[in-house]
Structure formats: C-alpha cells, structure tokens
Amino acid sequence: MRKPLTAALIALVALCLVVPTTAPAQAKAPAPPVTLASKTVDAHLGYMPQTTCSPKAKPGATALLKLLIKTWGGSSSGISRGCGVGSRSEHKEGRALDWHMSVKKASQRARVNAALTWITANNGEVALRLGIMYVIWNQHIWSVYYPELGWRKMASRGGDTANHKDHVHISLSWDGAYKQTSWWTGVSVTDPLNSKCGVNGARACLPTIARTSKSWPYQSTAVSASFTPAPWKIPGVGGSPQVGRLQRAVPGSWVPDGATLTYQWTSNGKPIPGATEATYLISPEQVGHDVEVRVTAEGRTKASTNIADVYPGRLSAPVAVITGTPAPGATLAVDLGTWTPTPTTFSYAWLRDGKSIKGATAATFIVRAKDKGHKISVRVSGRLRGYYILSRTSAKTKIGAIATTNH
Ligand SMILES: [Zn+2]
C-alpha cells in the first residue's frame, strides 16, 4: 500500500536526520572479544606517568580508539605525539588516545556520556579490564587510582582543546597499551608492567576496592577502601587525597631490608607538624594543597610525587525523620540520626508539598491551619569545615485534621 506523500516525506526527512550520526547514544556497550576466565579485575599500579620517548601508537591504544568510534561514532584526534611537544604526556609513549567528540553537540555529548558510564561503572570495572589509567572529558578527570573521588573538576587550562571539550583523552597503563589486559585476553593481569616492556618490574598490589555503581558525572556513593600502590623506585602514597581519608606511605623498592624508616608528611612542600607516622589522616587545612611524604632510610631521603591536590571530604548521614503530631497547632521536630563526622552547624528548611515555606528555617515547625491536607517535609543541611555541604530531605508527612501520632 502506498503511503501518503507527506508521511513518506516526513519519514525521509527523519532518515536524513538520523543517518549522519553514525551511532546512537543508546548504542549497546561492546562485548569483550573473549570470555573472562575469572571474575577478578586486572591489577594496576596507579598513576604511571610518561617517563620515556616512545611515541609509536601501541596496539591497545589503537584498538580502544577503534572500539569507541565503532560503537559510539566520532573520530580520532590521534595517539602519538612528538617527544618535544608540550609537557609530560602518555601520548609521547603511544599509550594515550584522543577521541574527537564535542561537548557542545548534544548528540555527541550523550554518546560520550554513555561510553564513559560504561567505562567507569562498578568502580571502573571496564576501565581496569581495558588498562585505562585515567580519562579527561569536559574539564573533569576520572582515574582508576582515585575511584572514590569520581569525576573531579579540573582548573581551566585555556580553550576547548586544552579543557577537553572537543575530545576525550584516555591514558592507558603499559598493560593496557600492550593490549594484554583481560578485556583483550580473557586473563586478568596480576603482575602489572611498570614501564615500557616491563623493565624494572615491580610486584603488583591488587586494588581492594568495594564495587558500587556510579553515574556520570559525579560519584555520590562513598567507597571505603583506597588503592595502595605497589612499591616502586620512589615512595608512593596509598589512599585518595580527600579530607578525612587516611594516607599510607609505601616506602619504595630502594629501601634496604631491615632499615629503620622515618616519615615526614608535607603540605605544598612544607613539613606538617607532628605528621611523622607511616600514615596520615588528611585534615581540613589541606584542602587545595598537595600532600606528599618524605621517607628517610639510613641517611637517604626520598619524596613521593604528588599527583593531585586535596579535595574536600564527604559527610555521610541517614535521611532525616520528622517527629511530632502532623496536625495544625502541633510542633514538628527532626530526628537527625547520626552524621559522620559530626557537622558544626545544621540548617533547616521546612517544605510544604516540596516547596520552601518562607521563614520556616528553625529546627522545629509549628503546623498551621492552612497546612491541613498538604504534605510537610524538611531539608536538613550539615556544614563542617573542609567538607562538602550535605543535605538530606525527610519523607513527606501528610497533615491531618485531628491529632494522630506520627509513628
Ligand atoms: Zn590527549
């Protein structure tokens, strides 16, 4: 049966609109080429920065870039970079890729978000299996070594290219670069390479990170355990740089057996008074500063390299519970539950049908006659220096005419 001309025309126009975008945002995430032999994800060594000149594209970088383009579209902005160009970059070792996509185009943004959700979900399960170290997109960075920090905003470096608004940057570990991680081989890496072709090989520490799901662009779920790097040529720091988290010094393979070690934690290069143990709990004063450790053994001192400034901590709290009789004339209060750590101040906003009630910002609320038949809830915000503000909203309580207890 012939379709009316207008319908055919609409169908044709729709087809034209669809064809240029080669892959939809809801493209099915790719399946690994081989079956994974065990459920263990690949071990990694944290951040392994570029240290050599070896710009030839490595097979894992080429294969991952191809996979991204095949699944979600876009194009290549390159892998190799001349060793004399710009600052330190894994592009100079052929183990970083730039996937050309634009933040400013909604369809491309949606496709990138789908791809990055696939990569980072479940605390970076796919990232670990592909040997991804970190991803930069839209001025945010996500890394396998700080999974509990999720996506972190970066300082502006200038234009759209410098701020990764016109491409996604992905850096790979050496195992990822050589295409020998479990995504490609089916066998999880247990002994990661720490440099080109595995010279100066170091033992691996398996990351002990609880798995939770997370969503783009920010991780809301707290992850308790932190990654501890394997001993390397210089001291390393285990733990994410966030207020309230414990940092652990990993002295390094240069330390003679049986040597007595001393530690000094530093902030922006200056010793932190009293911070001379193997571990250091990051305090609110350190927000925005880098924290490193100096390890001394038999007269020699080596410092760790800092890789990120300290981020504010995250409070945790249960949902607030309204107490009192939900009837006009009665006073409602809030059971806050236990907040960790304890905020110094709480603020309150009482809501009617989800909207703020003007002036109702005390810890208690006297129900008015006009609230009858409406739903009252309260939003509690906790503040503590060095921590992000956390807000928790109670369930909605329906206000009745007669006094009934709210149990
Ligand atoms: Zn790049």
Image: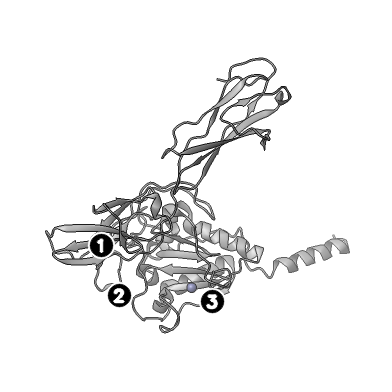
Tag count in the figure?
A: 3
Going by the numbered disc 3, the residue's amino acid type is: Ser
- Split into 4 quadrants, where in the image is the N terminus? bottom right
Alpha-carbon span between mark 3 and mark 2: 26 Å
**Horizontal side of residue 279 vs 74, given as left or right:** left
Q: Residue at x 44, y 72 (%)?
A: 96
- Say whether residue 119 is visible: yes
**Horizontal side of residue 125 vs 9, given as left or right:** left
Going by the numbered disc 1, the residue's amino acid type is: Arg
Q: Crowdedness of circle 2 by 10 Å Cα count: few (<14), some, many (20+)?
A: few
Name the N-terminal-most of marks 3 and 1: 3
Q: Which is more toward the observer, 173 or 365?
A: 365
Which type of secondary structure does the marked residue at label 1 adopt? strand
Q: Marks 2 and 3: in contact by CB < 8 Å?
A: no
Q: Nearer the viewer, mark 1 or mark 2?
A: 1
Q: Nearer the viewer, mark 3 or mark 2?
A: 3
Q: Which residue is mark 1?
A: 294
- Say whether residue 254 is visible: no
| Image vertical order of residue 47 relative to residue 364, above or below | below
Q: Which residue is mark 2?
A: 197
Q: Position of residue 302 (x, y in %)?
A: 23, 66
Q: Marks 1 and 3: in contact by CB < 8 Å?
A: no
**Horizontal side of residue 43 vs 10, given as left or right:** left
Q: Marks 2 and 1: in contact by CB < 8 Å?
A: no
Q: Which residue is mark 3?
A: 77
| Image vertical order of residue 331 relative to residue 180, above or below | above
Q: Residue at x 53, y 65 (%)?
A: 137
Q: Position of residue 377 (x, y in %)?
A: 62, 31
Going by the numbered disc 2, the residue's amino acid type is: Cys
Q: Position of residue 398 (x, y in %)?
A: 66, 25
Alpha-carbon span between mark 3 and mark 1: 39 Å
Q: Crowdedness of circle 3 by 10 Å Cα count: few (<14), some, many (20+)?
A: some
